[in-house]
Amino acid sequence: MGTIAVAKSISLPVDAATAWAFVSDYPRFDVWQSHIRSIEMLPNGDRKVFFSDGDVKVDRIVSSDDETMTLTYEMVPDQEPAPGAPVLQIIAKFVVQASDSGCEVEYGIVGGVPDGAEEMATRGVTSNIEGALAGLRDHLAAAE
C-alpha cells in the first residue's frame, strides 16, 4: 500500500474560538465543505458522509479537544474504495490556533492508497482540503 500526506493552512480574520466552533461541529461539515453533499449521523456516533461525486464513506472521531482546538477523525476501515478516489484509509486532523490577526486553521490528511495511485489520490485530497478551507473562510466571512 502507498501513502499520501497533505496539509494546508489558512489565516482567518476571526478569533480562534469562532473558527473552532465551526471546525468542531463534526455533524455539520456539509455546511462549509462543498465536496460534501450531506451527512447522516449514525446511532454509534459514526458519521456517514455523502460526497458530491456520489461516493459514500463512514468516518468517526478519534479525538476532539476544545482546549487545544484539535479535531482528529478517521475513515472506518474496510470500506470499498470509490472509482477515481482510491483512498483506502485516512486520518484527518484540524488544528486551530490564535494569531495576531485572528487565527490559523490547518487541515491535514494522511492516507493509505493502492500502490501506484499516490499521485491521483494526492490531487484529490489536496483539492478537498483546499476547498474545505476556502469554504470555512467564506462561511465565516458570511457569518460576520
Image: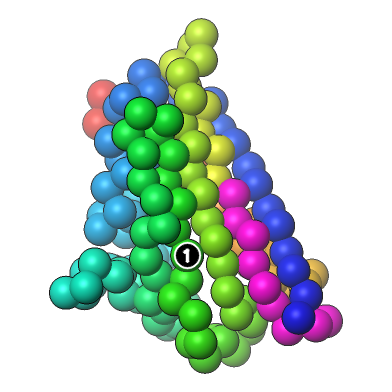
Q: How many marks?
A: 1
Q: Residue at x 47, y 71 (%)?
A: 75
Is 142 situated left or right of 79 in this image? Answer: left
**Which residue: 37% across, 59% down?**
61
User: Which quadrant would residue 60 be assigned to in this image?
Assistant: bottom left
For the record, the magenta segment spans 108-116
Q: Residue furthest top?
A: 100
Using a 10 Å C-alpha cutoff, classify the residue at mark 1 as few (fewer than 14 neighbours), some (14 to 19) or many (20 or more): many
Question: Which quadrant would residue 33 be assigned to in this image?
Answer: bottom left
Closer to the camera in the image, 125 or 115 = 115
Magenta-span inclusion, residue 114: yes
Residue 27 colored in magenta in the image: no
In the shown orientation, is residue 6 left or right of residue 135? Answer: right
The residue lying at 40 percent from left, 81 percent from top is 56
Circle 1 residue: 74
Up-down relation of residue 48 to residue 68 (above or below)? below
Q: Which residue is most to the right?
A: 116
Residue 102 image point, x, y percent: 44, 16
Give the quadrant of the N terminus.
bottom right
> Where's residue 137, x and y in %?
43, 35
Give the amino acid at mark 1: Glu
The answer to whether 73 is drawn above or below residue 56 in the figure is above
Residue depicted at 60% across the width and 80% down the height: 88
